[in-house]
Structures are given as structure tokens and as C-alpha cells.
Image (cartoon, rainbow, N blue to C red):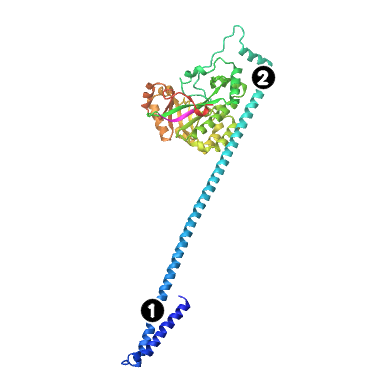
């Protein structure tokens, strides 16, 4: 209420009160001047009360209007605040995604750099041994090589290389019959020079294929792992097996470089298979030639340090004879791989006088025994070995199982896993198909 309204109201009921006090005695003679004065005061007080009530009502109405206005402002500010929060959330999410992308790109770049460094080392190594072998080859050696390609009169034809499952090279398959079934695509009757040409050309033209053979849990026969091994394709699509080129490449001086390249190719393809997020493990063989190649193997460890996420699904496999003969040379390198989280498997086990506790300390999680070797042992000795392995967290894999009769005998010993043609022959990985 404005000051003018207050003044007008006071004058109004004040004049009315004075008029009442002055006129009441003449209008009502029976009442005296004292009563008229009291009546005038009463009229003034009543007018003041009514004035106060109206003024308060007006103030309350104005206050209520102000509150409604404030609520409206608060609601608008709340909406704007919500929009700001949503924008801030969007900005944070964008920044987080950008940061993750940057981190992912940096990690990918680091892996690519590491991969290129190892590849460069392998290519240099292979080139060096080829140049060295070429420089050392004399005219007489060339004639000998030519004589092997073109036999002289009365010479016997070269024998086809036989399948030897006891080889400890990277490319071996743990099956007796699966490779025999593939003899229609395996090149035979090749000279040493022809074998070396196929190997070198295969490495140069990226014709190193990854084959996978299942390792199943028993008795369910459910695939739990795959053993990885390599084959090299010739230009006509046929293959050569490691047992065909090992001796030739060793004499040429290039076996270590070839094994190393095959191992690296195997690791690349296992990593691709992991991207499919299958809950399966992979066994990758490492040969004695790679184990004793100190320079390469240490660089290989650095490469695996940049790819330690493979540790949960990748197990490195070594032949018992290789580990026994070269443990003092390779122990520090294997401990380095173990510290990265990788576990090992021992295959081609011939001597069963194992120390499971010591194997567990060395990060061996699996041992692999051929079915024929296993069934030839005394049942009591096998049960005792199995108990010791179980106590130390080591699983037993029996390989080269080809018949149901073998499997029935093996199941009596509570074998953990089985491998062999009975459960599946080696097949070309889809990731290797070009």
C-alpha cells in the first residue's frame, strides 16, 4: 500500500471519528459529551484496525506474488542447470572417449613398433645367414648340390622324408595319422636346394600357415585348447613339413632364423584368434633352436612384454629333452616369461621320473605324454605321478589318441585332457587363409 493510500485512509476514518464525537450529542441528546467522545475514539480505533488489516492483506498478496515469481525463476534455473549438467556430461564423455582412443592408439602404436623391431631383427638374421651360406659355398659344393638334383647313372632316387612325430620343432603336430591323411598335398622327393627355395620363398611371400588341433577335456570331449603349429606352402599350393627342411636348413645355417620366423608368425595369428574373444587357450611350441638363440629370444621376451595380455590364453610348449639339456642356458629367460604371467607345457615326455613340485616352481602347468608311452607304464606308477601332479596344480595331457579303445583305458586314470586324431585332425586356421 502506497503512502498516499495510508494517508487517505487515516484522514478518512479520523474525520469520521471527529464527526462522530461532535455530532453525536446533538443527534442523541440523552447521551452526554463524554459518551460522544468515547464513541469517536472507538470509531477511530475501528478504522485503524480495518486499515491495518487491509494493508497486511495487500502486503501478503504482494509477498505471495513475489514468491511465485521466485519459484518460477528457480524452476527456470533448475532447467538451465539440468541442461548445463547434460552438456557437461556429454563433454566429459567425449573427453573420456578421446582419451581412451588416444591411449588405445598409443598402445597400438607401441605394439606395432615392437612388432616391427622383431620383424626387422628376423629379416636381418635370415638375410645374414643366407649371405654367409652363399659366400661359403664352393664350386665343389655346388657340384655336389647339382648331383643331388640330377642323379648320376646308377644313383638311387631320393627317399621321401618320413613323418617323425618326435621332432622338437615349432611346426610339429601331435598326431599320428592326421599328417598322413594330408600326404596328397605334401611335396616329396625334393632336393635340398628345392626345399630351401620353398622355405625362403614361403617366408618372403607370407605363405606360413597356422594349423590348429583341439585339446579336449576328458571325459566330456569338449575343446579347451588348441595346439598351434605351422606349415609352409609352395607356390603351387602344396606344403612342406618341418621334418623335410630341418636338417637341410641346419646345414645351411638358417634353421634358427626359420624357426624364429615361424614362432613369430604363430604368435601373430594366436593374437588375432584372441580378438574373437573365445574362451579357449592356445599352445605354441618353441624349439630348441629358438631357445638357444640368445639374442633373438631376449628380444622375443621384450615383444611378449608388450603383449602380456596373451598370457591368459597362450601357453609355451617345450620338449622334455630340450628343457633338460638346456635348462641352465635358458632358465633366466623362461623365468622372465613367467614373471610376465605366461605358463609352460612340457611335451614329448619320455622319462616319468619328474619332480612336479620343481616343475610348478618353473611355471609348468601341463605335461604331455603320448598315449602309447602312457599305456606302456605300470598303472600304479601312473596313478602316483597323477596324484603328485594334481597336488602341484599341473594337468596331464595324453596325446596321439586315435582309437576309442585307447580312450577307454585312459579314462580309468582320470586323465585331464586328451589330444589326437580321435578328437580332431589339425585344420587350417581361418585367420591363416588368404
- Relative vertical location of residue 81 with respect to residue 101 in this rendering, above or below: below
Give the residue at mark 2. 137
Q: Secondary structure at mark 1?
A: helix
- Number of callouts: 2
Mark 1 and mark 2 lie on one chain; the one further toward the N terminus is 1
Residue at horizontal 39%, vertical 85%?
A: 17
View extreme (left): residue: 30
Asked whether residue 258 is drawn in magenta, I would say no
Residue at horizontal 60%, vertical 18%?
A: 194
Give the residue at mark 1. 50
Image x and y of residue 198, in percent: 59, 21
Which residue is at the front of the view, 238 or 8? Answer: 8
Image x and y of residue 165, in percent: 49, 21
Magenta stretch, residue numbers: 222-227
Which residue is at the front of the view, 59 or 242? Answer: 59
Which residue is at the front of the view, 326 or 237? Answer: 237
Q: Is residue 354 something one can see in this rendering?
A: no
Residue count near mark 2 (Cα–Cα under 10 Å), binned few <14, some 14–19, many ≥20: few
Asked whether residue 224 is drawn in magenta, I would say yes
Labels 1 and 2 touching (C-beta < 8 A):
no
Residue count near mark 1 (Cα–Cα under 10 Å), binned few <14, some 14–19, many ≥20: some
Residue at horizontal 47%, vertical 58%?
A: 78
- Relative vertical location of residue 335 with respect to residue 234 in this rendering, above or below: below
Image x and y of residue 340, in percent: 52, 38
Residue 15 found in image quarter: bottom left
Q: CA distance from mark 1 to mark 2?
A: 128 Å
View extreme (front): residue: 27
Q: Is residue 395 something one can see in this rendering?
A: yes
Amino acid at each position: 500500500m502506497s503512502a498516499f493510500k495510508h494517508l487517505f485512509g487515516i484522514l478518512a476514518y479520523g474525520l469520521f471519528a471527529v464527526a462522530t464525537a461532535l455530532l453525536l450529542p446533538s443527534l442523541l441528546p440523552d447521551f452526554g459529551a463524554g459518551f460522544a467522545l468515547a464513541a469517536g475514539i472507538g470509531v477511530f480505533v475501528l478504522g485503524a484496525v480495518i486499515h491495518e488489516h487491509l494493508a497486511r492483506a495487500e502486503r501478503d498478496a504482494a509477498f505471495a506474488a513475489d514468491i511465485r515469481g521466485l519459484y518460477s525463476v528457480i524452476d527456470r534455473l533448475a532447467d538451465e542447470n539440468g541442461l548445463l549438467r547434460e552438456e557437461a556430461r556429454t563433454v566429459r564423455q567425449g573427453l573420456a572417449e578421446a582419451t581412451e582412443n588416444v591411449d588405445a592408439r598409443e598402445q597400438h602404436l607401441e605394439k606395432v613398433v615392437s612388432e616391427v623391431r622383431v620383424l626387422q631383427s628376423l629379416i636381418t638374421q635370415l638375410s645374414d645367414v643366407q649371405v654367409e651360406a652363399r659366400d661359403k659355398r664352393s664350386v665343389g659344393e655346388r657340384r655336389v648340390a647339382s648331383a643331388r638334383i640330377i642323379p648320376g647313372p646308377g644313383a638311387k632316387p631320393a627317399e621321401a622324408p618320413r613323418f617323425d612325430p618326435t621332432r622338437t620343432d615349432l611346426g610339429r603336430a601331435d598326431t599320428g595319422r592326421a599328417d598322413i591323411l594330408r600326404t596328397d598335398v605334401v611335396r616329396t622327393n625334393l632336393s635340398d636346394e628345392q626345399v630351401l627355395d620353398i622355405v625362403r620363398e614361403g617366408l618372403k611371400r607370407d605363405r606360413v600357415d597356422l594349423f590348429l588341433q583341439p585339446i579336449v577335456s576328458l571325459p566330456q570331449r569338449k575343446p579347451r585348447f588348441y595346439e598351434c603349429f605351422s606349415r609352409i606352402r609352395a607356390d603351387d599350393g602344396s606344403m612342406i613339413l618341418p621334418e623335410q627342411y630341418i636338417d637341410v636348413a641346419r646345414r645351411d645355417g638358417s634353421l634358427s632364423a626359420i624357426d624364429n620366423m615361424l614362432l613369430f608368425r604363430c604368435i601373430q595369428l594366436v593374437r588375432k584368434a584372441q580378438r574373437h574373444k573365445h574362451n579357449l587357450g592356445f599352445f605354441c611350441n618353441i624349439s630348441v633352436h629358438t631357445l638357444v638363440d640368445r639374442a633373438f629370444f631376449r628380444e622375443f621376451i621384450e615383444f611378449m612384454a608388450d603383449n602380456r595380455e596373451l598370457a591368459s590364453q597362450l601357453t609355451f610348449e617345450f620338449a622334455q629333452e630340450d628343457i633338460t639339456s638346456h635348462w641352465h642356458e635358458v632358465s633366466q629367460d623362461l623365468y622372465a616369461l613367467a614373471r610376465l604371467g605366461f605358463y609352460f607345457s612340457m611335451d614329448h615326455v619320455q622319462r616319468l621320473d619328474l619332480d612336479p613340485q620343481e616343475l610348478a616352481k618353473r611355471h609348468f602347468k601341463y605335461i604331455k605324454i603320448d598315449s602309447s608311452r602312457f599305456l606302456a607304464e605300470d598303472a600304479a606308477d601312473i596313478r602316483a605321478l597323477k596324484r603328485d601332479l594334481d597336488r602341484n596344480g599341473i594337468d596331464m595331457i595324453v596325446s596321439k589318441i586315435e582309437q576309442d579303445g585307447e580312450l577307454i583305458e585312459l579314462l580309468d586314470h582320470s586323465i585331464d585332457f586328451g589330444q589326437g586324431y580321435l578328437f580332431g585332425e589339425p585344420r587350417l586356421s581361418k585367420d591363416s587363409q588368404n
